[in-house]
Image: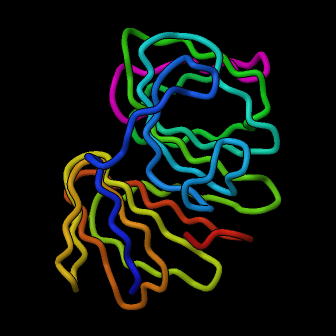
Amino acid sequence: MAVRVLRADERPAVPWKNGGGLTREVASFPSQAGIADFVWRVSLADVAEPGPFSRFEGVDRIITLVDGPGMVLTVDGTAHTVAEQYVPFRFPGEAATDCRLMGGPLVDFNVMVRRGRATAQVEIVRDRVALSAPAATTLLAVVLDGSAVFEKSGLALDRFDAALITDAPDEALKVTGTTALVTLTGTGAEG
């Protein structure tokens, strides 16, 4: 198993593309890719005020509420309530998207993939999960609440820590709390 641990306390906060909030990049491919040239990017964002989302042409997005009362996202004129924690919501990055907060600041988990180059699935895990990373696939485990431990190695992850996993035969992750398991496939999925 190849695992690269990405600790939460090592992530700098940077302004959003449109300047309307802060984001902390968990991982991207290529590593350290900019906003214009990532194949995939996973981040956590602090949303303190309502307003428009940045547009990302040719990008598929998955957003998941982690903390806070939630938001209403209006995507190309259609309102979607994102108020239940840990329920992923998928939408196109080039859509005109506006955010209205439902009572205060929040933290969300974002997965973005360049359409035609990579795909992503987000699974919310609250127990034990067997890990497998077939060829051209990368797994990213991000602890959203509580902790997680790799059963064989004993490697532990705390809240907002992450592990980038490739080649994971016969390994399992024991989750206490809630972890997002992101499966990234396609060209450039390898982290």
Query: Where residue 108 sits in the image (x, y, percent)?
Result: 44, 34
Q: Main secondary structure of the magenta part?
A: strand
- Give the camera-side residue of 72 and 49: 49
- Give the camera-side residue of 183 and 41: 41
Q: Does the magenta run of residues contain 70?
A: yes
Q: Which corner quadrant of the image does residue 63 belong to?
A: top right
**Residue bounds of the magenta highlight:** 65-79
- Give the camera-side residue of 30 and 79: 30
Residue at 26% x, 46% y: name it.
9
Query: Where residue 57 sits in the image (x, y, percent)?
Result: 81, 38
Q: Which corner quadrant of the image does residue 70 belong to?
A: top left
Residue at 79% x, 21% y: name it.
76
Total residue callouts? 0
Which residue reaches farthest bottom?
170
Residue at 55% x, 69% y: name it.
191
> Would you say 165 lies left or right of 59 here?
left
Q: In the rendered view of the protein, which quadrant contains the N terminus?
A: bottom left
Residue at 51% x, 26% y: name it.
15
Query: Where residue 137 sits in the image (x, y, percent)?
Result: 60, 75
> Would you say 122 lies left or right of 189 here?
left
Q: Is residue 66 above or below residue 20?
A: below
Q: Does the magenta run of residues contain 87?
A: no
Query: Where residue 80 sits in the image (x, y, percent)?
Result: 62, 23
What colour scheme was applied to this rendering of the protein? Answer: rainbow
Q: Is residue 183 above or below residue 26?
A: below
